[in-house]
Image (cartoon, coloured by chain):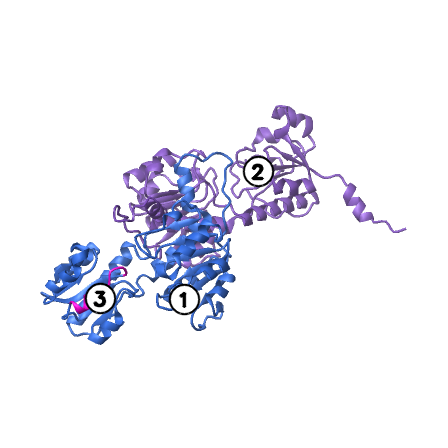
Chain colours: A blue, B purple
Amino acid sequence: MEKIGVLITHQPLPYLEQELTRRGCRLFRLWEAPETSRLEFCRENSAAIRAIVGNSNFGADAATIDALPKVEIIASFSVGLDKVDLVKCKERGIRVTNTPDVLTDDVADLAIGLAISVMRRIPSADKYVRSGAWKKGDYTLTTRFSGKTVGILGLGRIGIAIAKRAEAFDCPISYYSRTEKPYPNYTYYSTPVDLASNCDVLVVACALTEETHHIVNRAVIDALGPKGVLINIGRGPHVDESELVAALVEGRLGGAGLDVFENEPHVPDELFGLDNVVLVPHVGSATIETRTAMADLVLGNLEAHFLNKPLLTPVV
Amino acid sequence: MAMPSLELDSRYEEKPKLLLLQPINGPFKTALSQKFELVKADESPLPLPTFLSTHCLQIKALFILAPTVTVDSSLLDQLPSLGLVAAISAGVDHIHLDACRKRGVVVTNAGETFTPDVADFAVGLLVDVLRKVTMADRFVKNGLWMGKGDLPLGSRVSGKRVGIVGLGSIGSHVAKRLMAFGCPISYFSRAPKPNFPSYRYFSSVLDLACENDVLVLSCALTAETHNIINRDVMVALGKDGIIINVGRGALIDEPELVRCLKEGVIGGAGLDVFVNEPDVPKELFQMENVVLSDHRAVTTPESFKGVSELVIANLDAFFSGKPLLSPVSS
């Protein structure tokens, strides 16, 4: 990849930056340009830029793509591509790749970890002990996770990995998806409200599309109810966040474990004081192991493209 | 004339006496007092030895609510008619089993009623420490996500090699859960467990620590397991290794644990139990690589209900001469 210009939209893993440099790429660091002049930055360097490396928050919209007529490939350091204008890419014949599968285990691990953390109040226990307030005979009543019904919105790779883990806790599994899937042990519901009415823990694990935007709305939250727990390891816009905040503040929902938010890194500060809410900053795939594997996929896709070999994980 | 004899009999039958040394209240007290005459040492103005010699020479059953009371030879000597000590905990390190056995006193514990909750909690702590959940929650709730702070990457849970110290009911449930995360399981116990052929057995804790990324402590505290996790074991576990303790605080040499965490000899720890609860070594409060909790692994309504029913069933069985449901073997 000698001399190939690569636009990086975000501050990448040091390993990815090192490996691109080692392969002779010329790096254009979009995140270092002032926010107001990023399109200009693209136009100025458009003669050299043939590839874009994006991530789940910083992809490539139509204007960015238009500013870069020589771009041939967008290799995203993410599974979700909702920040990449795929229609535009198809029109232009730009190839798009993502990093599927490598983060499935991490996201599923975190989903179960969040559910236990919320129900057993682990972060609030930690805060309590560290405050020095623990006295003999004190205890907080918490909620058992084992055996609770886990409802999954979207039974894709991540949803299935979550189901497999939850089964080891003797949790009955139910799910919603557009069509029923061949998992006879899992109960299918044809609407999110029906799923939420019939589960204790609702996990959002579907892709973000127009149909799944605000798939968790007030009706779903009310169906989950004051003992129900919502886990979102999907995307922030899957959940109507203002309805979620209102339900948690009013005690209409039992608890929530959230890895994603509608306007990251903004998090509604009404949630900061709630012990039944566990908040983590979009770290579903934030492990050394997974980030390295994702970087290797980005590098592999770029290399394959410029050597005219089949892409490893093409989407477009 | 038909007499409702059974009903009358049970109504007027004298309730068996049950000795309590600690205050008790709530629905469990109500449930116990429906079946038993509660002899409450804690409510008497008399000193305990006087109370026991005055009121308890005929007492056959003792209920121990919390492990803050030690049942030793001197207590047992004051209760010559005692046949049963019914404990509410899973661990019975506060009850001297040898002393009980010598006097023909049987001991019952929580059996398996706490198993799912403790196993869940161990997995929760494990995911939390590796994925920095509590640390991340603190980070977000302190408003640090807006570009001001930086959260280090976590470590993958799936595939981590997990060594379980004590493959009893709780240990085997931890193993079952972690198998679903793709974690290879090995264990240390006094003898190999033929029921679990897919788990690798180690006859020494040191070897177990050498071959694993995570140690989960779920064994009973006995003379042999006291400080079973010493500095050598932690050195063998290594700088990325983590320890999860849902057993008893004294399974670990606590001052050494604090030193090893401080010096980076091990990578982190998730601790629900401590040597001198509720006192926790203050050095831990400043550490980012530990998750601390207040011995809450069993605090769910399901566990409380299950153990209450089990205690009553054990007492019923004892007083009617039937086999006990959860006797502890010494």
Discs 1 and 3 lie in a common subunit: yes
Q: Secondary structure at mark 2?
A: loop
What span is in magenta? A56-67
Please name the amino acid that badge 3 sits on: Ala
Q: Position of residue A264 (x, y in %)?
A: 31, 55
Residue at image x 40%, y 50%? A278
Q: Please name which of the two marks, 2 or 1, marks the residue nearer to the observer.
A: 1
Residue of label 2 = B65
- Where does the C terminus of chain B fall, quadrant-wise? top right
Residue of label 3 = A75
Q: Please identify the quarter of the rendering in which residue A258 is found.
A: bottom left
Q: Tell me: residue A193, above or below residue B82.
A: below
Marks 2/1: CA–CA distance = 46 Å
Q: Earlier in the sequence, mark 1 or mark 3?
A: 3
Please name the amino acid that badge 2 sits on: Leu
**Chain ID of residue with mark 3:** A
Within-10-Å neighbours for mark 3: few <14, some 14–19, many 20+: many
Residue A154, which numbered label? 1
Query: From where the camera sits, is residue A222 visible?
Result: yes
